[in-house]
Image: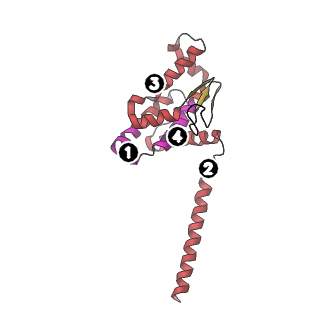
Amino acid sequence: MKSKFLVAAVLVGALIGAWKISKEREAQPDLANTEQFISYASDQAVADAQKFDGITLDYSIDSIKNVDAVLGQVHDSYVKNPDSVQVEGVAAEYGAYVGEVIRRHEPGTYWTKDSKTMGQKIYPLHRGSSETYPIAWCAHKVINGDEDNIWTKYTVLRDDVLKAYGKKDVSKADSHSEQSSK
């Protein structure tokens, strides 16, 4: 009698375990291509910034400064206890967000999964013949703090793009970015 009860309990436990696994798999997004991955990751950054920091990320150029603030707080946690921060996940979310801000405001900018120079699954952002790596920017910000400022990296990139396209007054780049976002 006890053995029948034990077998029944094991079977019920196995069925519940299989059901839970199938439900978890249903909740995971299908990230079949680069665009889906970037979209999902950047949406997660928006949700996490609001939920955990009360910061709204709205895909404006100025919101890159908010990413710097959020990642500064993550850096503080990382310094206290490196194991408490999933650097790759945080960097993927916020790097995808920063890259999407740039892509949305700079025509001709696009993502790929792999980089010809840096390797596979790097997710570089392309403009013309150049690549930039906002996901790596964010990983470095988490690990190194303010010495790896995201806003500074963006402004250097923006100024280089403006110079490449023959715009002489790079100090007016903020107004250029604001106009292109309207």
Question: Which residue is farthest top?
Answer: 168
Q: CA distance from mark 4 to mark 3?
A: 19 Å
Image quarter where the C terminus lies is top right
Give the residue at mark 3.
Answer: 152
Q: What residue is shown at x 66% (from left), y 45% (from top)? A: 32
Question: Which residue is farthest left?
Answer: 80
Q: Nearer the viewer, mark 1 or mark 3?
A: 1
Give the residue at mark 2.
Answer: 29
Q: What residue is shown at x 55% (from left), y 9% (from top)? A: 168
Q: Are marks 1 and 3 in contact (CB under 8 Å)?
A: no
Q: How is the image coloured?
A: secondary structure
Callout 3 amino acid: Thr
* Badge 2 element: loop
Mark sitting on residue 82:
1
* Residue 103 image point, x, y percent: 60, 29
Give neighbour class at mark 4: few <14, some 14-19, many 20+ (Cα, 10 Å).
Answer: many
Give the residue at mark 4.
Answer: 92
* Residue 177 image point, x, y percent: 56, 21
